[in-house]
Image (cartoon, rainbow, N blue to C red):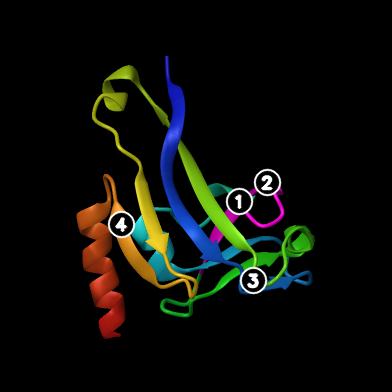
Amino acid sequence: MQRTLLLAKIHNCTLTGANLNYIGSISVDRVLLDAAGILPHEQVQVLNITSGVRLLTYAIPAPANSEAVELNGAAARLGTKGDRLIIIAYGQFTPEEIKHHYPTVAFVDENNQLLKVEGDNKEEAQAQSHQAALL
């Protein structure tokens, strides 16, 4: 049997835009996706802290260090620039995997700059963040 657990999240990011004319998804600064370990096109749940709205979509990378977090397509109607969001990815785990799993959490500031990473992806995320900062 497998169980669904939190795999990764980007905590308390700021919505920077909403684009109704895009086909769909949420665009997220590539540095933040990498830090959390969320893959391009991976299903994510978006929790709007400001409004209480929850939605299911998929993540697409915005340019690294752009600070972008943008709702696209129909989802654009569910947020306003400046709203605070949590972006979550879930994973399926066996009982054995659960024993060794700790979710990756990327904490950001009000400008969507990475503050710290906790969890399974911490060391890799910090190395990638450092590389992106050098670009």
SS label for mark 1: strand
In the rendered structure, which disc, 3 or 4, sits on the residue that comes first in sequence?
3
What x and y, as percent, mark residue 81?
68, 72
Task: Give whichever of discs 1 and 3 has the lower sequence position.
Answer: 1
Badge 4 or badge 1: first in the primary sequence: 1
Cβ–Cβ under 8 Å for marks 3 and 2 = no
Q: Which stretch appears magenta?
A: 49-61
Tag 2 residue: 54
Name the kind of residue labelled 4 in the image.
Val
Task: Give the mark nearest the N terminus, 3 or 2.
Answer: 2
Q: Label 3, on which residue?
A: 82
Q: Observer-nearest residue: 16 or 19?
A: 16
Which comes before the other along the chain, label 1 or label 2?
1
In the rendered image, which quarter is residue 36 located in? bottom left
Q: Position of residue 46 (x, y in %)?
A: 60, 51
Whether residues under marks 1 and 2 lie with C-beta atoms below 8 angstroms apart, the answer is yes
Q: Is residue 102 left or right of residue 8?
A: left
